[in-house]
Amino acid sequence: MVSWHLKGLFRLLLGWSATFALEQSAEREISATRENSQFVLLAHISDVHLSDFSDHSRLSDLFRLSSFLKMSTTKQPPPLIITGDLADSKRGHWSGGQAQSEWEMYNQFIEQADADGVTVLDIPGNHDRFGVFSAADANSDFFTNFSATGKEQRRHNGVYSRMVGPVLCVGMDVTPIPGPNRPVNFHGVVTRDVLTELDIALSQPADVKVVFAHYPTNTLVFPAAREGHGGRVFEILHKHGVSAYLSGHFHALFGHHLTAVHTASPASTTTDPPNSFLEWELSDFKDGRHLRLLAWDQGRLTNAIFKSPKHNEVQSPMALITAPAHASHLRASPTPLPTDVMRLDKVRVVVVSETVVDKVVAEICQGAAGEGIRMGRVELHRVHGEELLWEGVWNGTILTSGMYAAVIYANGIKQPAMKASRRVAWAFLVKYGIRYWTGDGGYLLRRIVK
């Protein structure tokens, strides 16, 4: 038993060290596709946990978020991806069950978002399946009746896809049905049917492909066959050149916003270098009110995390740097920068604001944000035909090695620096703790769903 643990720890340490080395190649791979493709902005929240028993401000803050997205542009507002746990569904510390009143609250938000022109792409989480014994039971499966996806698809446990400009968004519902109650309902159950549907959905042509689900990949189990951690999900995502996998589920249990890079093995891919995709877990909306903005701009997918607007507060502008890539996207050791960063001739920034923005400035620093050497100050101008996108002249060759950062000022207001989402010790805890937990919990779920 001791030797098994030591071997497991050793493998995990090697695996995480490799991830650090691969981050730069993953960013290069993602940025290598069509540089002149259309600009698209997406929003992402997770783990809303609307409750009939506590904190009704969650609903009012959802309304506020919808209004903020609407007010940020005179065009179509960015679509909002919600990765599960829409309702709280708790009846005490160790019990759970669906409450129609909570789903009616969520439906109010869906109706408001529709009125605001905000497209909602939602997927259920484990809390949304507590005590759901059959998808045909209208008294318990409220996701089908009250969610945006459920009302449109009229089905459960599968794959849903939607084109957003050049971006293919694919939602993967792997919540177990029947749904075990707390505390054993923790893992996503990937059936062969889900794998087949995922493969078909991702076969659609698109400039960029994003998959979203409630569960991080290290909490997926396979009842039909013991295919290992992640199984064929990774093979399918690599096969179709997926850029990012979005999830929630962990809240802030292991820190905020788990990130990882998954690179295909050379033997399983025909691309050189092998395809890579980024996994971005997001902390909760429930307590943290976290909001992720994702931008597809000039062939690069970038993201930044903010505090979602609150119903009783004025929201300052939110700025997301799309080029050059922020240091927290590369997360590299002090080695030469990728050539695609060094040859960039412009700084490009997305500014999302419900008030008029008339001045945006970028400060580029060599080294960590706020601690490095200031390399220049760039005044940006709005890109023709784009309300949210700003750019200014930039000389990428002045950055020759190591880490760098950019600080953005919108209307003179300094934007929070985007920070790397993990530390080695924290990542080690997540990978070891959850994989070990998956061994027991996954077996329990396999026994339940057979």
Image: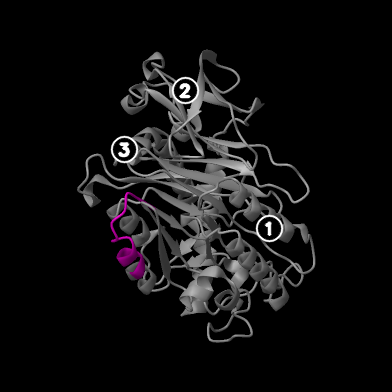
Assess disc 1: are there few (<14), some (14-19) or many (≥20) residues with their C-alpha within 10 Å of its C-alpha: many
- Secondary structure beneath label 2: loop
- Residue lying farthest left? 270
Residue 35 is marked as 3
Residue that appears at 31% across and 25% down: 339
Residue that appears at 59% across and 56% down: 46
Say which of marks 1 and 2 sits in front.
Answer: 1
Residue position for label 1: 63
Residue segment shown in magenta: 197-209
Q: Is residue 430 left or right of residue 212?
A: right
Quick check: can you spot residue 322? Answer: yes
- Percent coordinates x, y for residue 131 in the rendering: 63, 78
The quarter of the picture where residue 296 lies is: top left
Q: Is residue 304 magenta?
A: no
- Percent coordinates x, y for residue 12 in the rendering: 45, 44
Q: Is residue 201 magenta?
A: yes
- Using the image, determine if residue 335 lies above or below residue 43: above
Q: Is residue 239 left or right of residue 82?
A: left
- Using the image, determine if residue 398 lies above or below residue 97: above
Q: Is residue 128 left or right of residue 334?
A: right
The quarter of the picture where residue 104 lies is: bottom right
Q: Amino acid at mark 3?
A: Glu
Residue position for label 2: 403
Q: Amino acid at mark 1?
A: Phe
